[in-house]
């Protein structure tokens, strides 16, 4: 009997608790439904944003690969791809690297320019891209190092060796790019500057005397050619005597 009584009491307690839950849902059900809807919307928005972010990253990587691996059909297409990458803000690292690559492209074209004015315009454009990289992406150490190296090469081509040396030192200054190829190239270029800056010595006068072994005078006339005796046979041969 005691066990049955305890069971009945437990059922009564459970029924009472269920009743409280039902009463709570009657009073607060609309709020719970609203909360569940909000949570569902938040989850949906997160999934949608994540999907768009992944699609954007995939598109950027595809554009970068096309521009940097020779898949672009022309230099114009490559420049358009790099310009689009440089303008986006989703991936600052790729934007900075694309900006400095635009500078490299103009500097390379300047090397084969047909006129001086064309070369100057391309070098000025390259310097602007390098400067934009340094100013707009100061936290992107690799891109900044490449921009300083590019500026150093521009100064070196103009024989402005002091400015070139400063840019090379800036290119290898960051600890984040130690050992990177651009740092090695900057070190090599910096070491070569003293040799490039040294004046080239050239002879200004002819030697006063000729070497002792050289003859002082040349013969006035060439020696006469030796005569050749005429080796042709005589025109007629004497007639041989006939035997009786």
Image (cartoon, rainbow, N blue to C red):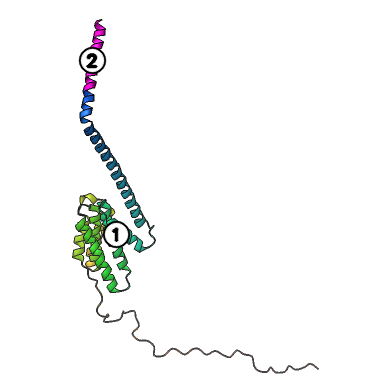
Q: Position of residue 59 (x, y in %)?
A: 33, 51
Q: Is residue 167 above or below residue 242?
A: above
Q: Which residue is mark 1?
A: 83
Q: Is residue 3 above or below residue 92?
A: above
The answer to whether residue 148 is magenta is no
First reached walking from the N terminus: tag 1 or tag 2: 2
Check if mark 1's residue and mark 2's residue have beta carbons within 8 Å: no
Residue occupying image coordinates x 28% and y 82%: 209
- Residue 79: which quarter of the image? bottom left
| Marker count (numbered) | 2
| Front one among 28 and 117 | 28
Residue 182 seen anywhere in this rendered image of the structure: no
Q: Quadrant of residue 239?
A: bottom right
Mark toward the viewer: 1 or 2: 2
Residue 197 in view in this figure: yes
Where is residue 214? Give x, y as percent.
34, 80
**In magenta segment, residue 3:** yes
Residue shown at 28%/68% (left/top)?
122
Q: SS for tag 1?
A: helix
| Real-space Cα separation, disc 1 to disc 2, in angstroms | 75 Å
Mark 2 neighbour density, 10 Å: few (under 14) some (14–19) many (20 or more): few
Residue at the spot 33% in from the left edge and 48% down from the top edge: 55
Q: Quadrant of the N terminus?
A: top left
Residue at the disc numbered 2? 12
Q: Nearer the viewer, residue 198 or 86?
A: 86
- Percent of width and height locating residue 34: 23, 36
Q: Quadrant of the C terminus?
A: bottom right
Look at the image and give the residue range highlighted in magenta.
1-19
Q: Residues within 10 Å of mark 1 (few under 14, many from 20)?
A: some
């Amino acid at each position: 009997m005691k066990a049955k009584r305890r069971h009945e009491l437990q059922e009564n307690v459970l029924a009472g608790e269920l009743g409280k839950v039902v009463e709570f849902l009657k009073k607060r059900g609309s709020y719970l439904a609203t909360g569940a809807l909000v949570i569902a919307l938040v989850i949906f928005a997160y999934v949608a944003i994540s999907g768009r972010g992944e699609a954007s990253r995939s598109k950027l990587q595809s554009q970068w690969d096309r521009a940097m691996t020779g898949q672009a059909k022309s230099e114009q297409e490559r420049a358009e791809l790099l310009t689009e990458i440089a303008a986006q803000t989703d991936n600052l690292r790729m934007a900075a690297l694309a900006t400095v690559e635009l500078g490299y492209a103009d500097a390379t074209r300047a090397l084969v320019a047909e006129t001086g004015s064309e070369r100057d315009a391309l070098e000025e454009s390259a310097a602007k891209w390098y400067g934009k990289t340094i100013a707009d992406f100061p936290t992107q150490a690799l891109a900044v190092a490449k921009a300083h190296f590019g500026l150093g090469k521009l100064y070196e081509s103009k024989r402005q060796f002091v400015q070139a040396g400063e840019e090379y030192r800036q290119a290898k200054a960051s600890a984040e790019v130690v050992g990177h190829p651009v740092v090695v190239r900057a070190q090599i270029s910096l070491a070569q500057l003293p040799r490039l800056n040294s004046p080239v010595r050239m002879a200004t006068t002819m030697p006063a005397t000729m070497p002792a072994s050289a003859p002082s005078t040349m013969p006035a006339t060439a020696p006469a050619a030796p005569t050749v005796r005429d080796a042709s046979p005589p025109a007629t041969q004497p007639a041989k005597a006939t035997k009786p």
